[in-house]
Image (cartoon, rainbow, N blue to C red):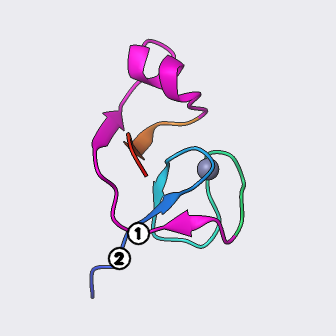
Amino acid sequence: MAKEKEHVCKQCGYMTTENKCANCGAENSVADKPKGLAVVFNMKESQIGEKLNVNTNGKFALKY
Ligand SMILES: [Zn+2]
């Protein structure tokens, strides 16, 4: 299985291999090359999640 390239949602920074963002639902709104990365394991207790307006667990770019 080939490793899919990850993209960054321009709306919320969510890292995804799909064309549609699983966090905010934005379509065709992905950019390459995140400059910083945050991994949210528990978005309800994460200060990063609060700051980034995260709706789901996953990887988020800090700058994009
Ligand atoms: Zn998004």
Q: Residue at x 59, y 27 (%)?
A: 53
Left or right? Give the position of 25 relative to 19: right
Give whichever of 15, 35 is nearer the camera.
35
Is residue 57 or residue 50 the one in the foreground? 50
Q: Residue at x 63, y 49 (%)?
A: 11
Q: Which mark is residue 32?
A: 1
Residue that carries the numbered disc 2 in the rendered image: 5
Horizontal and vertical percent position of residue 1: 27, 87
Looking at the picture, does residue 21 appear above or below residue 55?
A: below
Relative image position of residue 60 (x, y in whole percent): 41, 44
For the question of whether residue 61 can be seen, the reply is: yes
Look at label 1 and name its amino acid: Asp
Residue 51, x across and y down, in percent: 50, 20
Residue range highlighted in magenta: 28-55
Q: Position of residue 64 (x, y in %)?
A: 43, 52
**35 within the magenta span:** yes
The residue lying at 29 percent from left, 44 percent from top is: 37
